[in-house]
Amino acid sequence: MSGRILSIASITLKEALRDRILYTIVFFSFFMISLSLILDEITVGQQTKIIKDFGLSMMSIFGAMLSIFVGINLLYKEMEKRTVYNILSKPVKRYEFIIGKYAGLILTLAIIEFSMGVILIMMDSFFEGLKSISIAKAAFFTYMEVCIITAIAIFFSSFSTPILSGIFTFSLYVIGHFLNTLMEISHEIKSGFVKLLILFFYYFLPNLENFNLRSVIVYDLKISPDYYLFVFTYGLIYIVVFLFSSCIIFEKRDLK
Amino acid sequence: MEVIVIENLVKEFRTGFMRRPFFALKGVSMSVEKGEIFGFVGPNGAGKSTTIKIIMDILRPTSGRVNVFGKQPSDISWRNKVGFLPENPYFYDYLKGRELLYFYARLLSIPSSFLNERISFLLNLVGLREAGGVPLRNYSKGMLQRIGIAQALLSDPELLILDEPMSGLDPVGRIEIKELLLKLKRLGKTIFFSTHILSDAEMLCDRIAIIVKGSVKRIGSLDELLKQKGIGFEIVAEGLTDVPIINNFRGNYELKKEGERWIFTTGDEKVAEGIVHYVISHGGRLISFGRQRMKLEEVFVEVMHES
C-alpha cells in the first residue's frame, strides 16, 4: 500500500515542481523576505524583530497561496485530463490516490517552506548570531497551517470545480484567521442567528491563529511545551478530518 | 469460463441546470468468455465507454451488476490481471515513455529486478524502442496510443480492456496493433475492445455486441450475427440466351443482370444446386458459385434503422 502512495506522491512532487505558478509565487516570496532587510534598515531600534515578523508572515501568506492554487487543481487536472483512469485501473484504491496526491503536494510545500525558513534564519543570524531555533519552531507551525489549508483545498476539490474550491478554501483561510476577533465582537451582536453562526465557526472551523507563533518569537515569550503539543494535535486532527472526508466523497463519486 | 459478466446494467446521468435524467445505459447484459476477442461495437455516444468505465470502476452504475473474474469492479484484487487502455489516453506529458511505464509498473508492484527488461520488451513490441527516452509531450497521437497499449500490457494481464485501441493510428499502425491483438489471443489472452470501425471488429472478433442508444441490439459470433440476416448463395452465369426462368424454384431465388452476366441469389442450398443444373443444361457457362455473405456493416445499418 505505502509503495503505491509513495509512487503517486513522487509523481505529484515532480508535477508540482514544474508548475509555473509555483515558481512565480516562490520567487515573489523570496523577494518579499529579502525586502524585510530594507524594512529593518528604516525601523530604528527594532532590528531583527521586523525580519522575523515580516519573514514569517510572508511564509504563511505565500505558503497558503501556493497550497490553494496548486491544491484546488490537483484532483481536477487528473480528472479533466483523464490521467486518473490509468492510475485507478492499476491496483490502487481511491483513498490511496487522494493520500498520495496530498503527500506529494505537502512534500513540495515542505521543500519551499524549508527554503524560505533557511533564508530567514540566515538573515536573522547575520544580525543576531545563530540562536534562531525559535524561528524554526514558528516556521514548522506555519508549515502545519499550510498543510491544513492544502487538506481543505483537496476536500473542496473532491466535489466541486477549481474556482468554487478556491473561493471556499480562501474563505476558510480568512475566517480561520479571524475566529478570535469574531468571537470578541459576537458579544456586541444582537442577532441570535449571527451569534450562533459565529459560535459554530469558532468551535468547528480550524482556528489558524493557533499556528501563528510570530509574536511569541518576536517578543521572545516563553510558552510551555504542552502548547506546542496541543497545536500540533489540533492541526493533525483537522488534517485527518478533511482528508478522511475527501476520501469518502471521492470514493462515492463518478470520475467523469 | 466467463471473465466479464454484465447483467442489466443501467447508468443514469443528470444533465443541465434542471438536472434532467439521461440514460446512457438502459439494461445492458453480456458476458465475455476466456480466450476470446470480444468486440463492443456501436456509434459514438452509444454507451461503449460508459460500460467500460463502469467495468473499470471509474463510474458507478445506477443499477445492475458487473463482475470481472467473479469480483466486483471496486475490488482491486483483479487489477493485476487486467490491462486497460482508455479512449484517447492522456498521460503525464512531462515524463519520458520509459519513466511513464516505470511509474505504472511501481503501482502494479512489478519486481524491480524484472522491470527494465519488461519495459524494453514492451517498448519494442509497440514500436517505440527509439522513443522510450523522449518526453510524452513530443509524442504523436499514434505514439500515445502505442505507449497506452504498452502500459496496459505491463503486468502481462490475462484480460485486456481497450477503449477504441485503433483510434488515432495511421494505417500501418492499425495493422500492427491488429496483428498484436491476434498474437495476444494466440497467447491465450482475453481481449474486450470497443470500436466504431466495423471492419476492425469483423476482422478480429470471435464475438460481437452491437450497442445503440444504451441497449445491446445484437450479440453473438460473426456467423451468428450474419445468419440472423441470412447467409445465401450467389451463382454467376453467362451465355444464357433468354431470361432464365426456373419453374421448380420460382419465388425462391432472386435474379439480376449485370452486362452479359446473370446473377442468381438464394438462401436455399437445394435451389442453388438446381440453378447450377439449369445453367449447365441450358448451355450457359458457370462463372462462379459461392456463398454470399453479408457484411457486418449491413447488419449494423439494419440495427441503426431499427433504433
Image (tube, grey):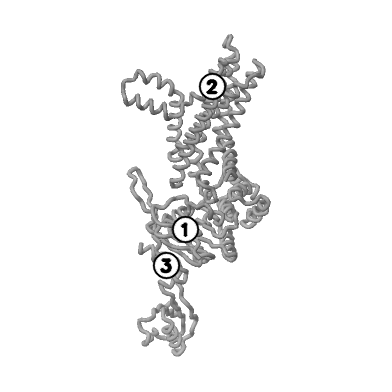
Q: Which label was assigned to residue A213? A: 2
Q: Residue at x 54, y 27 (%)?
A: A229
Q: Circle 1 — which element?
A: strand
Give the letter of the chain under mark 1: B
Residue A201 occupies quadrant: top left
Residue A129 occupies quadrant: top right
Q: Mark 3 sits on what residue? A: B299
Q: Amino acid at mark 1?
A: Asn
Residue B211 occupies quadrant: bottom left
Q: Which label was assigned to residue B67? A: 1
Q: Nearer the viewer, mark 3 or mark 2?
A: 2
Gap between marks 1 and 2, in whole Å? 55 Å
Gap between marks 3 and 2, in whole Å? 74 Å
Q: Circle 3 — which element?
A: helix
Check chain identity for marks 1 and 2: say if they share one: no
Q: Circle 2 — which element?
A: loop
For mark 1, does the 10 Å Cα neighbourhood hold few (<14), some (14 to 19), or many (20 or more) residues? some
For mark 2, does the 10 Å Cα neighbourhood hold few (<14), some (14 to 19), or many (20 or more) residues? many
For mark 3, does the 10 Å Cα neighbourhood hold few (<14), some (14 to 19), or many (20 or more) residues? some
Is B245 situated left or right of B280 in this image? left
Give the letter of the chain under mark 3: B
Give the letter of the chain under mark 2: A
First of labels 3, 1 by sequence position = 1
Q: Amino acid at mark 3?
A: Val
Nearer to me, B198 or A60: A60
Q: Amino acid at mark 2?
A: Leu
